[in-house]
Image (cartoon, rainbow, N blue to C red):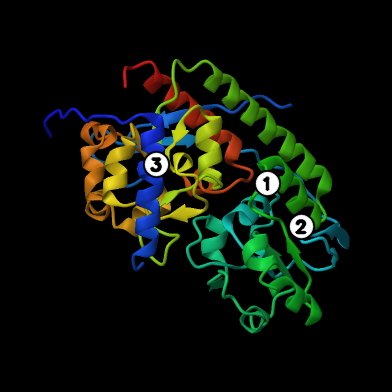
């Protein structure tokens, strides 16, 4: 499309505009070596072809533990403050792909018994059961799965809602490893509950080394490019933007970018109006592989958010696609994803906005 100059408001004006746009939209219906990473061409690895200008940003050295022999029982402190003893993890209900990613790294793929319906992990998709995990998930539904362990990944959904307590009262061990914590801590806690604390410590050390390397790369950026992370989920099926407390926002900040959801001070995934997108003027549109599938492909992304084309990122066709477990979750793949994103942003930062 033709080159189009877009006027840019001041930082204060942009923050105010974004806050208003988000508020209005919300009211509408609706240490080991560092990883080797890469920015893959649009058709790498047999993946679905992407339009010209789009690229895959993929960390290619995700830590993996070998020769792990978990030992149960294991007694751990759940993030809701309760001590839980795990005696059998053979049929585990996993609350999110962050939990499943650690299980995969430990070689416990076959123990993933139930996974979220929108899981993007191989073990999650191969699980015998898929289940809807949200704030309204009931204990009866979880118990009906006849599992041996429940591992929740959110204090908001699985702890504060009372779900974990009800499951324990019914005899099902329930451990919460909250999503809003650093990836190395989450890896340690998750591995420990499966009786693999030593392997978890090794994995966590690798992840931390990768995160440190990403921060080192980001420190050398000439500037911080603006990034908008869009998702097909998070607001009753409406397209959303990653807010300040999401794993994606933390990744963008660490990798040397400015997450536009931060400017409005919103949390979680929030709907952003079409006007707010133009005002944000992102230089990069960041989307996960699974969200791109849920959108319906590349063309459907523009249909869902038409004014994305009116931004610097849209005008340049600069859409970056990342694996879900490297972008949307803090887990064992976070460090590899952070290095890859930092490398991609470094190249962009050298160009004039």
What is the number of the mark on residue 206? none
Relative image position of residue 196 (x, y in whole percent): 81, 50
Residue 52 found in image quarter: top left
Q: Which residue is mark 3?
A: 16
| Position of the C terminus by quadrant | top left
- Measured along the vertical axis of the image, is residue 214 above or below residue 145? above
Q: Which residue is mark 1?
A: 181
Mark 1 vs mark 3, foreground winner is 3
Q: Which residue is mark 2?
A: 79
Horizontal side, residue 71 vs residue 325: left or right = right
Which type of secondary structure does the marked residue at label 3 adopt?
A: helix
Q: Nearer the viewer, residue 327 or 199?
A: 327
- Measured along the vertical axis of the image, is residue 310 above or below residue 70? above
Horizontal side, residue 96 vs residue 237: left or right = right
Mark yes or no: residue 164 visible. Answer: yes
Q: Earlier in the sequence, mark 1 or mark 3?
A: 3
Q: Do the residues bearing badges 2 and 1 touch, measured as CB atoms within 8 Å?
A: yes
Q: What residue sits 68% from the left and 61% below the top?
A: 155
Q: Earlier in the sequence, mark 2 or mark 1?
A: 2
Which type of secondary structure does the marked residue at label 1 adopt?
A: loop
Relative image position of residue 295 (x, y in whole percent): 32, 57
Relative image position of residue 81 (x, y in whole percent): 82, 60
């Amino acid at each position: 499309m033709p080159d189009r100059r877009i006027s840019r408001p001041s930082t204060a004006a942009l923050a105010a505009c974004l806050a208003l746009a988000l508020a209005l939209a919300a009211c509408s219906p609706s240490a080991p070596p560092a990883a080797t990473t890469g920015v893959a061409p649009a058709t790498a690895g047999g993946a679905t072809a992407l339009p010209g200008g789009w690229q895959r940003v993929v960390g290619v050295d995700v830590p993996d533990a070998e020769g792990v022999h978990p030992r149960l029982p294991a007694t751990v402190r759940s993030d809701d403050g309760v001590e839980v003893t795990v005696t059998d993890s053979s049929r585990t209900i996993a609350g999110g792909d962050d939990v499943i990613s650690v299980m995969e790294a430990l070689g416990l793929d076959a123990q993933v018994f139930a996974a979220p319906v929108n899981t993007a992990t191989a073990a999650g998709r191969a699980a015998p059961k898929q289940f809807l995990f949200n704030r309204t998930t009931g204990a009866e539904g979880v118990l009906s799965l006849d599992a041996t362990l429940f591992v929740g990944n959110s204090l908001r959904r699985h702890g504060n809602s009372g779900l974990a307590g009800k499951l324990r009262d019914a005899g099902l061990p329930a451990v919460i490893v909250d999503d809003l914590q650093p990836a190395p801590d989450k890896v340690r806690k998750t591995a420990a509950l499966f009786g693999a604390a030593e392997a978890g410590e090794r994995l966590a050390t690798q992840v931390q080394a990768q995160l440190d390397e990403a921060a080192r790369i980001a420190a050398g950026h000439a500037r911080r490019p603006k990034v908008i992370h869009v998702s097909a989920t998070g607001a009753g099926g409406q397209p959303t933007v990653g807010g300040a407390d999401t794993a994606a926002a933390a990744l963008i900040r660490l990798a040397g970018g400015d997450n536009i959801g931060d400017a409005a001070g919103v949390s979680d995934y929030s709907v952003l109006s079409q006007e707010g997108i133009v005002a944000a003027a992102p230089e990069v549109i960041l989307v996960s592989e699974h969200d791109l599938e849920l959108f319906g492909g590349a063309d459907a992304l523009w249909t869902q958010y038409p004014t994305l084309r009116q931004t610097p990122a849209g005008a340049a066709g600069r859409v970056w696609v990342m694996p879900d477990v490297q972008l949307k979750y803090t887990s064992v793949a976070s460090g590899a994803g952070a290095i890859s994103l930092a490398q991609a942003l470094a190249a962009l930062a050298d160009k004039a906005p």
